[in-house]
Image (spheres, rainbow, N blue to C red):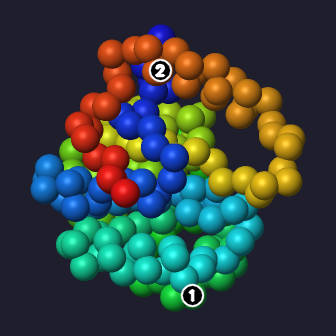
Amino acid sequence: MLKKFYPYEHVKSVFDIDYEKLYQQGFRGLVFDIDNTLVHHGDNSNQKIDNLFSYIKKIGFKTLLLTNNDEPRVQRFIENIDTPYICDANKPEKSCYINAVKSLNISKEKIICIGDQIFTDILGANRCDIPNILVDFIRLPDERKFGKRRFVEKMILKTYKISAYRHRLGDIIREL
């Protein structure tokens, strides 16, 4: 029952992923959420994220942003990033993931979705059998409160950590 909520892998941040290993495994497309995955909610991209996208593209990946945000928000975010996007996606609906696969023109088995929310990013990708990575959501040091969904996600992650569904992508955590 909980399997549909389990990510293929769980890492601290997008910077902890070994993208070169993913590419060596045959993955060719990366679908990213924006808010609390790449930057804090509502923030614009920054030099670190811009450099990450540049690095990912040099490896050979195609990228796409899949977000429930509106177009003005996405346009602000991608000012220095050359990537297609789907906004107002209505995640976790299957159709937005299918559209992302079509847009990248890569088979879903060669795409990885990366996001911070189990009930949108991970559930939607799993419903379409797309490999995925859950990252810890970004929050500011002084942020103490978070929604009820985050509490439920925390409980799901506890069961995930003792399940057989962990590390389905192999050793893709970047060594520092």
Residue at the spot x=73%, y=53% of the render?
139
Residue that protrudes farthest toward the bottom in the picture:
80
Q: Residue furthest top?
A: 1
Numbered circle sitting on residue 160:
2
Q: Which residue is drawn at the image coordinates 22% and 61% (left, top)?
A: 20
Counting residues from the start of the chain, the first of labels 2 and 1 encountered is 1
Which amino acid type is shown beneath numbered disc 1? Glu
Evaluate whether residue 13 shows in this view: yes
Say left or right for 109 vs 150.
left
Q: Which mark is residue 3?
A: none
Marks 2 and 1 in Cβ contact (< 8 Å): no
Q: Which residue is labeled 1 in the image?
A: 79
Q: In this rendering, does residue 99 appear at all?
A: no
Viewed as shown, does residue 53 lie left or right of 150?
left
In the image, residue 116 above or below residue 40? above
Give how far apart the Cα atoms at labels 2 and 1 are: 37 Å
Answer with left or right where residue 66 lies relative to residue 59. right
Query: Which amino acid is tagged 2?
Result: Tyr
From the top left corner, tell me how far across and down residue 49 is, in percent: 51, 74
Rendering quarter of residue 128: top left
In x, y percent, where is residue 112?
A: 33, 50
- Residue 144 in percent (x, y) is at 85, 43
Foreground residue among 22 and 67: 22
- Which residue is painted at 33% across and 76% down in the image? 55
